[in-house]
Image (cartoon, grey):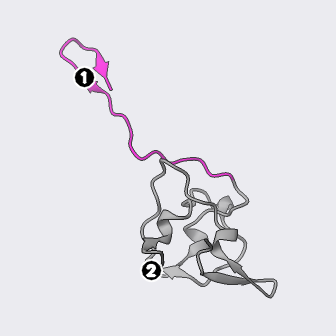
C-alpha cells in the first residue's frame, strides 16, 4: 500500500514509497517525523540516511523540525545497511575472561 504522501518529480506526483528505501529488519529507525500511515510513523517505514551520498536529489518539502525528509531517509537507489538494534558489550568475569 502506498504511503499516500507524494512529491512532484518532473511534473508527476510520486509516492514517497517510490523514492525512499524501506526500513531494513533489525535497524534502528530515524526519530519520529510525525507523519503516519495506518497509525505508524514514517520513520518505521523508511531507512534512515547514514551518509550524505544517500540523499535524494531534491527536497520533498515534508519536514521534521525544519529538516527535509531528504536529509532523514535514504534514497531508494542506494542499498542501505542495517543499523543494529543492540550492541554487545563484553562483561569481564573474575577469571579475567569476557562473556557476551
Q: Residue at x 66, y 60 (%)?
A: 54
The x, y position of residue 68, in whole percent, is 56, 77
Q: Which quadrant of the view contains residue 7?
A: bottom right
Instruction: Tell whether position 97 is magenta.
Output: yes
Which stretch appears magenta?
79-100
**Left or right relative to 28: residue 54:** right
Q: Which residue is mark 2?
A: 65
Image quadrant holding the N terminus, namely: bottom right
Mark 1 neighbour density, 10 Å: few (under 14) some (14–19) many (20 or more): few
Viewer-proximal residue, 8 or 59?
8
Q: Nearer the viewer, residue 36 or 48?
A: 36
Check disc 1 and report the residue beneath it: 92
Asked if marks 2 and 1 touch (Cβ < 8 Å), the reply is: no
Residue, x 42% and y 47% (percent of image)? 85
Image quadrant in which the C terminus is located: top left
Looking at the magenta stretch, what is its main secondary structure?
A: loop
| Category of crowding for the residue at label 2, using alpha-carbon neighbours closer than 10 angstroms: few (below 14), some (14–19), many (at least 20) | few
Q: Nearer the viewer, residue 38 or 67?
A: 38
Q: CA distance from mark 2 to mark 1?
A: 42 Å
Q: Position of residue 41 (x, y in %)?
A: 45, 71
Closest to the observer: 43 or 96?
43
Q: Which image quarter: residue 59?
A: bottom right
Q: Residue at x 70, y 70 (%)?
A: 18
Residue ranking furthest to the top: 95
Measuring 60% from the left and 60% from the top, which residue is drawn there?
Answer: 22
x%, y% of residue 25? 51, 49
93 relative to 72, above or below:
above
Against 25, residue 56 (above or below) is: below
Amino acid at each position: 500500500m502506498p504511503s499516500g504522501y507524494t512529491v512532484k518529480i518532473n511534473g508527476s506526483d510520486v509516492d514517497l514509497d517510490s523514492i525512499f528505501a524501506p526500513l531494513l529488519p533489525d535497524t534502528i529507525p530515524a526519530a519520529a517525523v510525525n507523519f503516519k500511515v495506518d497509525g505508524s510513523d514514517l520513520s518505521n517505514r523508511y531507512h534512515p540516511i547514514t551518509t550524505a551520498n544517500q540523499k535524494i536529489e531534491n527536497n520533498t518539502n515534508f519536514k521534521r523540525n525544519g529538516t527535509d525528509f531528504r536529509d532523514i531517509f535514504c534514497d531508494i537507489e542506494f542499498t542501505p545497511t542495517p543499523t543494529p538494534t543492540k550492541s554487545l558489550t563484553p562483561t569481564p568475569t573474575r577469571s579475567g575472561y569476557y562473556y557476551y
